[in-house]
Amino acid sequence: MAVFPPIMKPPHTWGAPPEVTIASGVAALSGEGSYLVDTEADAASDDLDKLTGLVEGDEVVLKAANNARTVVLKNGAYLKIGVDFSLNNQYDTITLLCIGSDTCVVKGGRASGG
């Protein structure tokens, strides 16, 4: 009996990341991909509590849109990331995996100490 390797997703070819702006703690995405995230009304800092527009299995890479503003991903009901995580310069990124319609975890990580 022949053994076949598991089916894998092809490498990502997302292109240039679009910019999304936080609105009331939410960033509305348009599926998996890479995104530049900016604060609401260009505030110096803004909390990001939830991502919408994703389905289970989607992977997203979030980056800071502006070095002068800080996006704080808040660990909580929708972002299971262990601790709050700040994006405050062009080199800060976080890769998340959607595990439900509105819940994401750090890809390859563990959100609890257990």
Image: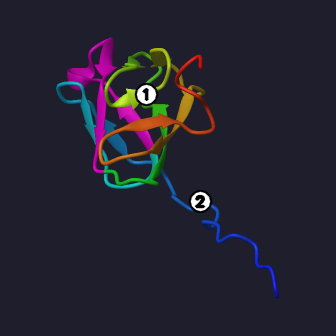
Q: Which mark is residue 12?
A: 2
Q: Point out the image quarter for the N terminus.
A: bottom right
Q: Please, which residue is most extreme toward the front here?
A: 1
Q: Residue at x 54, y 32 (%)?
A: 94
In the picture provided, is 50 more to the left or to the right than 63? left
Q: Residue at x 17, y 25 (%)?
A: 24
Q: Quadrant of residue 46?
A: top left
Q: Is residue 46 above or below residue 107?
A: above
Q: Is residue 90 above or below residue 104?
A: above
Mark 2 vs mark 1, foreground winner is 1
Q: Position of residue 96 (x, y in %)?
A: 50, 39
Q: Position of residue 111 (x, y in %)?
A: 52, 25
Type of the residue with mark 2: His
Q: Position of residue 89 (x, y in %)?
A: 53, 21
Query: From which residue to which does the magenta span run?
Result: 35-53
Between 68 and 72, the one lying in front of the other is: 72
Q: Could you classify mark 1 by the number of other residues whose Cα lies within 10 Å: few (under 14), some (14-19), or many (20 or more)?
A: many
Q: Residue at x 48, y 18 (%)?
A: 85
Q: Position of residue 53 (x, y in %)?
A: 28, 50
